[in-house]
Amino acid sequence: MFHPALFKGSNVVITGAGRGIGLEIARQFLDCGAHVLLHGGREPRGAIPEFLETALAEARAHVVHADFLTPDGIAALARQTDSLFEQVDVLINNAGTMVGRFPAGELTDAQYETVVRLNQTSVVEVTRALLPFLQRAPHAAIVNTVSISARTGGSPGSAIYSATKAFVTTYSKALARELAPDGIRVNCVSPGTIDTDFHQRYSSPEKLEATRKSIPLQRLGTAEDCAPAYLFLASNALSGYVTGQVLEINGGQLIC
């Protein structure tokens, strides 16, 4: 899709890259020549896909497993980054999940803190930890994953998840202004309803079918639909004058 040398020589760190959108982002960066550090979540899950096995064998990819709910999780990612890269050209903050659907009146403190920690605090802490590496790159880019629910409020039980994604949206715009003097661009990709195991866990088949019918393109999105947006926003050649923006990938869902 993109030129195979688009990111040749670039160092890319991707959080939440063990599956779904994050894993597809990693695949496409590797296809374009990047050297990629994938955060694969708390622990390994199942078989490693063939493209990643090849990239690992060729030392073009590296995987770190770290639990962002623990005090040492982000520090482990930073240590691995430091051991591999002198600079980071692209940071993709993709880690996060809904955790569960929690009605407002039943939400516990522990549930609230978990959702906020995974979706909001981790973005702040990863960015802070890797900022010195980004500042060493001549044209660094940060791309943060948000969600259509940051604008719509989401569906019942996802209020805190939606609010954390709205936080990341505003945080990203503020960062774009603050980091512009360093030549660091900051943007967001906002997926709509994407057919990954995220929705298999948190949405019923009936709900997904109703959503599909409401989307102008008449289908749910895929990880392959989303990943090119990250590469576009990460590339200085393609989007060097774009910062502080949110790119919506939803098949027209927002215009309904």
Image: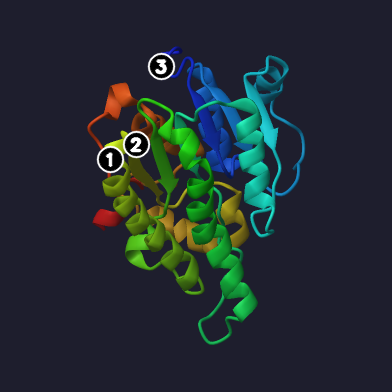
Residue at the image point whose x is 59% and y is 39% from the top: 17
Residue at the image point whose x is 43% and y is 38% from the top: 226
Q: Earlier in the sequence, mark 1 or mark 3?
A: 3
* Residue highlighted by disc 2: 184
**Quarter of the figure that contains the C terminus:** bottom left
Q: Earlier in the sequence, mark 3 or mark 2?
A: 3
* Residue highlighted by disc 1: 180
Identify whether 84 is placed above or below 122: above
- Asked if labels 1 and 2 touch by Cβ distance under 8 angstroms, the answer is yes
- Say few, some or many: other residues with alpha carbon within 10 Å of mark 1 (under 14 / 14 to 19 / 20 or more): few
Residue at the image point whose x is 38% and y is 55% from the top: 213
Relative image position of residue 74 (x, y in whole percent):
62, 49
- Asked if labels 2 and 3 touch by Cβ distance under 8 angstroms, the answer is no
Relative image position of residue 58 (x, y in whole percent):
68, 14
* Residue highlighted by disc 3: 6
Query: Within the image, what quadrant is residue 154 found in?
Result: bottom left
